Amino acid sequence: MSYRIVLIPGDGIGPEIVAGAVEVLEAVGAKFGHDFQFDTVLAGGCAIDAYGVPLPEDTLQKCLQSDSVLLGAVGGPKWDTLPGHLRPERALLGIRKALGLFANLRPAKLQKELAAASPLRADIAARGVDMLIVRELTGGMYFGPRGRGEGELGENAYDTEIYSVGEITRIGRVAFDTARKRGGKVCSIDKANVLESSRLWRETMHRLAAEYPDVTYCDMLVDNAAMQLIQNPAQFDVIVTSNLFGDILSDEASQLTGSIGLLASASLGEGTRGMYEPIHGSAPDIAGLGIANPIATILSAAMMLNLSFGLTAEAKAVEDAVAAVLAGGARTKDIAAGGDFIAGAEMTARIIAAL
Ligand code: IPM
Ligand code: MN
């Protein structure tokens, strides 16, 4: 089969880590007889430099015509003072919205060999971490009405959290359907003791939960969830939450696994086309040093193989190769816990060798 993949390397370490994932995809293509066609486009800070806008129309059109998109990272200090609509991050939000990618899947799993890199206490780490955060991605505060005004205490600014029953239901279904294929548990995280939008979220999730009697359901307030993730992460299977809470909690969950450099993500809509990206950012402080960990991007490519192309054996081969290389002791700097480490390109080469 032939697949058209749009590559958005972006800024900072983006180009290095996307290059690693492309090498792995090419190795998968050679091994399993698939033809992956890559088209590289600009978005984020590099697009601002080249065209004056974070998301050029040509980039968006190519994404819309692709079978899937693989993104590195966007942003950096160079563009931090630009007005909101011109910031590199707008590119991500624009692609998610235009492609209708409302469901963001962020798995966080602690591999036992990496327990030393995790900040968890040994007895807590030993009970395991294996969760999937399902983050709503095209609604809530990130997309609600916003603005600035003038009040008694001076200039003010506001953002609005709005969720409809339709939006909550469709993300809820993704969580419940996925839980059936995993540990059979869904925990919905909200702030229903304060926010009206969370009360609607909770009511809607309860209605859905009744349709999935085989899935164990619970609600949790977001402040408690932030604590439970550290204290007892083994209790979680699938977490479903809003755009804002999911952004924050997925960074927290990533740390439990040892490094944010290990965590992949998939953003999906109604069809099979998705956008796949590591959950970490552009890490401008280490860009170009060759030490960035390519694993999160390589595992994102594996998620693409599985979720967008239905190539489950190929995806598993990549995941197994990554696990084998880590189990064999290879470490990039972020997961070396102060010990010896190898370059990002060397990590990619070892994963390909294990494949
Ligand atoms: C992420 C990022 C983005 C987000 C930013 C860069 C807009 O933090 O993918 O988690 O908040 O969604
Ligand atoms: Mn984030």
Image (cartoon, helix red, strand yellow):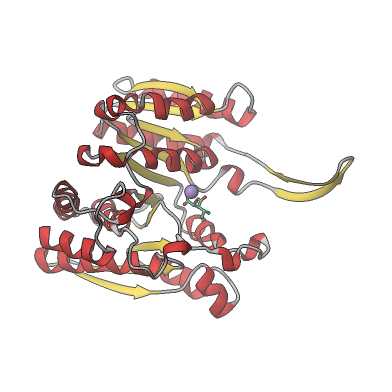
In this rendering, position of residue 299 left or right of residue 106: left
* Residue 142: % across, % down: 59, 48
* Residue 294: % across, % down: 30, 59
Above or below, comparing residue 140 to residue 342 in the picture: above
Tell me which corner region of the image, top left, top right, bottom left or bottom right, holds residue 173: top left
Residue drawn at x 23%, y 40% as measured from the top left: 111
Above or below, comparing residue 325 to residue 233 in the picture: below
In this rendering, position of residue 343 left or right of residue 55: left
How many callouts does the rendering have? 0
* Residue 233: % across, % down: 35, 28
* Residue 315: % across, % down: 19, 53
Residue drawn at x 27%, y 39% as measured from the top left: 116
For the view shown, which residue lies furthest in the front direction? Answer: 339
- Which quadrant does the N terminus fall into? bottom left
Tell me which corner region of the image, top left, top right, bottom left or bottom right, holds residue 80: bottom right
- Which quadrant does the C terminus fall into? bottom left
